[in-house]
Amino acid sequence: MNTHALTDLCYRMADDELILAHRHSEWTGLGPLLEEDIAFSSIAQDKLGHAQALFTIMHDLGGEPDADTAAFMRDELKMRCSHFVELPNGEYDFSLVRHFLFDVAEYVRWTALVQSSVEPLANLARKIHGELKYHLYHAQTWMVQLGANGNEESHARMQSALNEAWPYALGMFEPGEFEDALIADGIFIGEAVAQQRWLELVTELLQSSTLMIPTQVEPIYGGRKGHHTEHLKPLLDEMTEVYRIDPSAEW
């Protein structure tokens, strides 16, 4: 097994989960409905759990730092998250669209990882499958509710948010340095196949929303190689402030 390929994959996935969890948590107390405050908080907690599990797999198999060190002691140049998760929440329509597009991608990735040759990854994928179905159901429900069952304004706003989010969403599938090794070793299906499966599922799930998928859009890459938006550093500064005061403290 190529441990460099495994580590690269896990960091990409874990960093996406970690940063989007933080973004989701920013809606706590600010959502339009109490139920949505609870839902976004719950989903954020799940994503943090996924990130922690991935960091732990890397620590156990590849000798990477423990989960807290990996999450809180790297600067933005060492992060491998996509630009998509770094973007500020904006209005609720954008956050819902990002939630939907990301969780379809997450569902596709973890479903594929059930067959991974890396047993801890496969076991984790099986364990969290129920969570992923809930996340996806929640996201699709709101895409339909505001896209098809709302009014003219809600439909227009959701379509505008989808148009804005699409190139960043495509950036989630930026090819990594070890694509060939991941595929050859049976660790993961690779970004090209993942993107195709994601597009097929997004297309299927959006049919009942009456929203149109943007066409002829170029993906926004860079995050997987450590080139990030201006939004990541302030987020990391806020997220890691307490831990960095005393990394050896016991809570």
Image (tube, rainbow, N blue to C red):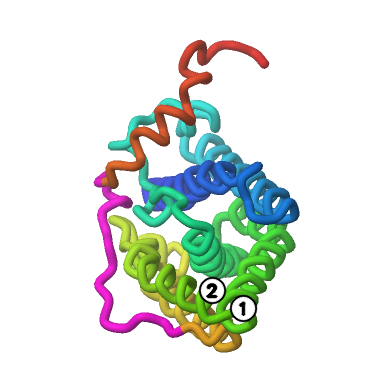
Residue 78 location, quadrant: top left
The three-letter amino acid code for the residue at tag 1 is: Gly
- Residue at 52% over, 19% down: 242
Residue 216 location, quadrant: bottom left
Q: Is residue 236 left or right of residue 115?
A: left
Residue 44 horizontal/vertical position (percent): 62, 47
Q: Residues within 10 Å of mark 1 (few under 14, many from 20)?
A: some
The local secondary structure at tag 2 comes to: helix
Q: Is residue 83 above or below residue 145?
A: above
Q: Are marks 2 and 1 in contact (CB under 8 Å)?
A: yes
Q: For the stretch drawn in magenta, what is the main secondary structure?
A: loop
Q: Tell which of 101 and 67 is nearer to you.
A: 101
Q: Tell which of 59 and 214 is nearer to you.
A: 214
Could you say which disc has been placed on residue 150 in the image?
Answer: 1
Q: Is residue 216 left or right of residue 88?
A: left
The Cα atoms of the two marked residues, 2 and 1, are separated by: 6 Å
Could you say which disc has been placed on residue 100 in the image?
Answer: none
Which quadrant does the C terminus fall into?
top right
Range of magenta residues: 212-227
Residue 34 horizontal/vertical position (percent): 73, 51
- Residue at 55% over, 46% down: 21
Residue 3 horizontal/vertical position (percent): 42, 47
The local secondary structure at tag 1 comes to: loop
Q: Tell which of 187 and 128 is nearer to you.
A: 128
Which residue does the numbered mark 2 point to in the structure image?
Answer: 154
Q: Residues within 10 Å of mark 2 (few under 14, many from 20)?
A: some
Q: Is residue 199 above or below residue 52?
A: below
The three-letter amino acid code for the residue at tag 2 is: Ser
**Residue 78 lies in the magenta-colored region:** no
Q: Is residue 227 above or below residue 172?
A: above
Q: Tell which of 115 and 125 is nearer to you.
A: 125
Residue 161 shows in this picture: yes
